[in-house]
Amino acid sequence: MFATRQISSIAKRAFSTSTSSNAAKVAVLGAAGGIGQPLSLLLKQSSLISHLSLYDIVNTPGVAADLSHINSDSKVSGHVPDNNGLKEALTGCDVVVIPAGVPRKPGMTRDDLFNTNASIVRDLAKACAEHCPKAHILVIANPVNSTVPIVAEVFKKAGVFDPKRLFGVTTLDVVRASRFVSEVKKVSTEDAKITVIGGHSGVTIVPLLSQSGHSFTEEEVKALTHRIQFGGDEVVKAKNGTGSATLSMAFAGARFTNSLLEATVAGKKNIVEPTFVKSDIFAKEGVEYFATNVELGPNGVEKIHPVGKVNQYEQGLIDAAVPELKGNIAKGKAFINKA
Ligand code: NAD
Ligand code: LMR
């Protein structure tokens, strides 16, 4: 159900039929997958998109044909590797969203996906660096803590890296946090805005419940923190070997993409979303990328918000996240810079 105001702003655009004159070409790589299809459906509803370009190794012609009958004004094209499909999908893109890659099964960590997904993301990043070097790149594929540095290193090697245009999509963590807190506090999700910082896996997901304006018992803090950190595992377990979060992720990915388009295409001010970006906040500790709230502007990252006031418990969570993040980031960088 479209229950919150945040959602209804996406919904409003959803039913708008006029496409903005300077609307964007947006590519979804992995568009035929569990996330890719519902994400593309949500993006088809945006009037800030003029061309939705769908790429996958299989099935995108069908997905594109299906979506192209929806009477919003954007054009939809479907591409597979044949006939320079990736080049065609990417050329002229303003935004590229990457949910391509394998999802977890029960018992796996996100890092267990590294061996398969690192090379998928590397190859797609190489193509982006070649065919749309100025596009904003939104990385959904896990492990995000490592795949974002992988994209950065590929872009650096190609001499086209702009840290303001590379985003790890951590929106699902704040979407979950908002929902879980709203259930516990029995308030609308509108009144449950939770800051989540760090990265996107287990202990690197750090909710700052003390900044929410709500009061919690110690038990509530521990239970909510654990649920937010391991919300992904809840879905993996419930799906019982058939995948991980797809629908909530599509919602979260569309929210982030729409926010970026509002800032870059529509020129709206004060658009703030949490995202995993190149950041100085824990640079001294050796952490090059970190998720905090980020103000988005015409060129992507406009201003990285500081962490703000945290309590002792949250400081402990940050202390646990930092070494893990450092290792995840180093692993991604080493994958590109080996040999
Ligand atoms: P899925 O298997 O349903 O879909 C993945 C799609 O990627 C498939 O259609 C596949 O054909 C495609 N693909 C594989 N290799 C490709 C390549 N080289 N080029 C283009 N497409 C390629 O998986 P899913 O459930 O959609 O999940 C995708 C990824 O997103 C996983 O890595 C998952 O862990 C991650 N994920 C991230 C978040 C987050 O919060 N960032 C949330 C949920 C899932
Ligand atoms: C999530 O948080 O749902 C995703 O990262 C998918 C996963 O593996 O849990």
Image (cartoon, helix red, strand yellow):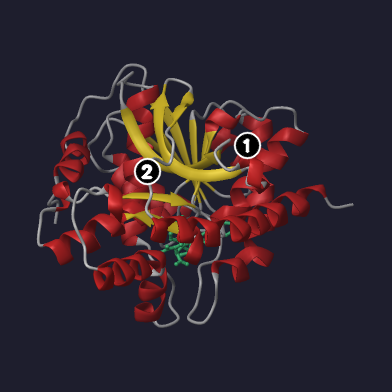
Inspect this view and state whether residue 49 appears.
no
The residue lying at 36 percent from left, 75 percent from top is 234
Instruction: Return the x and y of residue 184 as percentages of the image width and height.
Output: 17, 66
Q: Position of residue 141 (x, y in %)?
A: 53, 55
Is the residue under label 1 in contact with that under label 2 (CB below 8 Å)? no
192 vs 287, left or right, is: left
Q: Which residue is mark 1?
A: 128
Q: Under tag 2, what secondary structure?
A: loop
Horizontal relation, residue 146 to residue 79: left or right: right
Instruction: Please state if 168 lies on the left or on the right of 244 as rendered.
Output: right
Residue found at x 43% / y 77%: 242
Residue 329 in view of the camera: yes
Structural distance between the alpha carbons of marks 2 and 1: 38 Å
Amino acid at pointer 2? Lys
* Quadrant of the picture in which ligand 2 is shown: bottom left
Q: Secondary structure at mark 1?
A: helix
Q: Is residue 258 above or below residue 48?
A: below
When the figure is inspected, residue 34 is found, relative to residue 301, above or below; the finding is below
Q: Is mark 1 within 8 Å of ligand 1?
A: no
Q: Residue at x 54, y 58 (%)?
A: 319
Give the residue number, with chain letter if any, for mark 2: 309
Which residue occupies the foreground of this view, 259 or 119? 259
Q: Earlier in the sequence, mark 2 or mark 1?
A: 1
Estimate the x, y position of residue 264 in percent, counting from the top left: 40, 23
Amino acid type of the residue tagged 1 in the rendering: Cys
**Neighbours of disc 2 within 10 Å: few (<14), some (14-19), many (20+):** few
